[in-house]
Image: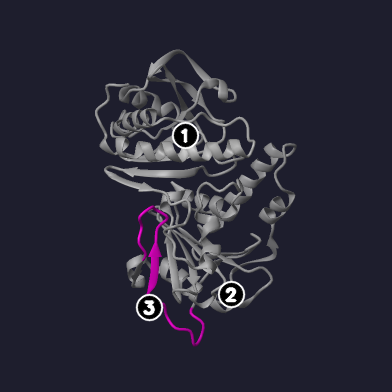
Amino acid sequence: MNSNPTYPAARVVAPTVENHFARHLASARDRGEHDLAPEPDAQSIEAIINATFWASLRPEEGEFPKISLAFVPPEQTKQPLIFEYRLPLATDILTKLAPAVEREGIHLGVWLDGDELYVWGAVRTLPSFCFVLEVIEPGLLVVKHRRRGGFGKFANVVVLKGEQIKIVDEKGTSLPDCPALLRSLLAFTAPSTDNSVNVLIQLAASMRAHGHGGSLLVVPAGTNTWRSSIVHPILYSVVPPFAALTDLISQGLTEENQNRWEVLMRRAVDTVAGLTAVDGATVITDRYEVLAYGGKIRRPAGSMPVEQMVTTEPVVGDEAAVVQPAQNGGTRHLSAAQFVQDQRDALALVASQDGRFTIFAWSPCEDMVHAHRVDALLM
């Protein structure tokens, strides 16, 4: 299909990726959905990953390429930019094209002529469940797809870093059989949920994108027990609560308001996520109302310090491990774990400046804090 050098991980993972898209597209068709993306075959998946991996390692004018490819014909997209002459899917071609399409949301369109893949142009809007391959950094690739409904963060399927392959655990089998914990984490971690507006995923992706690190505490609406775990006075207390996200969710997404609603939702998500860049923690309710930001977490009188926690990652084959708090991050992570231990009906979302992202929740089955590292979902 092409003359690029061989990337062994591409061949290993291609059948798994093929099966993932086949299952989800079949399920969508059974639900009566239309305008679905074409189903990628293992041979095409392998070839696209192979060419893109080697392109990611080749700098152009001193810059390594950041590029996104979508497996879709131009007629299934909206307002595509179509090249007059088709270009072969080759490492040197991708390297040359990368500077023109490195901005977020732009994809190079790739399609088949017989059994040969070619690059036909660029596009922003993709059909549901479209196969996308994105370069995050040299040698680090993510297979993902557009969610049903199309809003927000794409759903990650596989993360490839050199020879390391991480298959995202979309069914939560990497988590312990603990109903209360699963209720807290599954809505966040399931990458292919039919709920196209999972606000926690959008907030987490935006927090990670601003690159400053930050903490977001999610507490039950209408309660004040969380205040015992925050130093007072809270310098940036918000009165009345900022409810832009809450209002947008209550309005709901419809065909009539789709464009304006999506713009306003992105703006509200980025506004709330931006507050987490301020030193200290941002506090929101489980209805997404902002109560405060810049809060300093403290251990209430009489509470015990966190001595150990369970760690997991939403990756197939991951095994839970019990670790000391110092093994799971720095001060920001430790304070979030302490907050969740003291406020057991809360969640804590923590972004590191290096891109690590962890959700802390209390696990009654394990009787300790559970730290679920979700970088693989947010790249």
Residue at the farthest front position: 30
Tell me how the rendering is colored.
one colour
| Residue 160 falls in image quadrant | top left
**Comparing labels 2 and 1, the label whose residue is closer to the camera:** 1
| Percent of width and height locating residue 260 | 70, 39
Does residue 97 sit above or below 217 in this rendering? above
Q: Residue furthest left?
A: 5
Q: Residue at x 53, y 56 (%)?
A: 188
Query: What residue would you read off at disc 3?
Result: 307
Q: Is label 2 in contact with label 3 (beta carbons under 8 Å)? A: no
Element marked by disc 2? helix
Between residues 295 and 45, which one lies in front from this camera angle? 45
* Quadrant assignment for the N terminus: top left
Residue 42 is covered by the magenta coloring: no
Residue nearest the observer in this picture, 177 or 271? 177
Q: Position of residue 273 (x, y in %)?
A: 55, 54
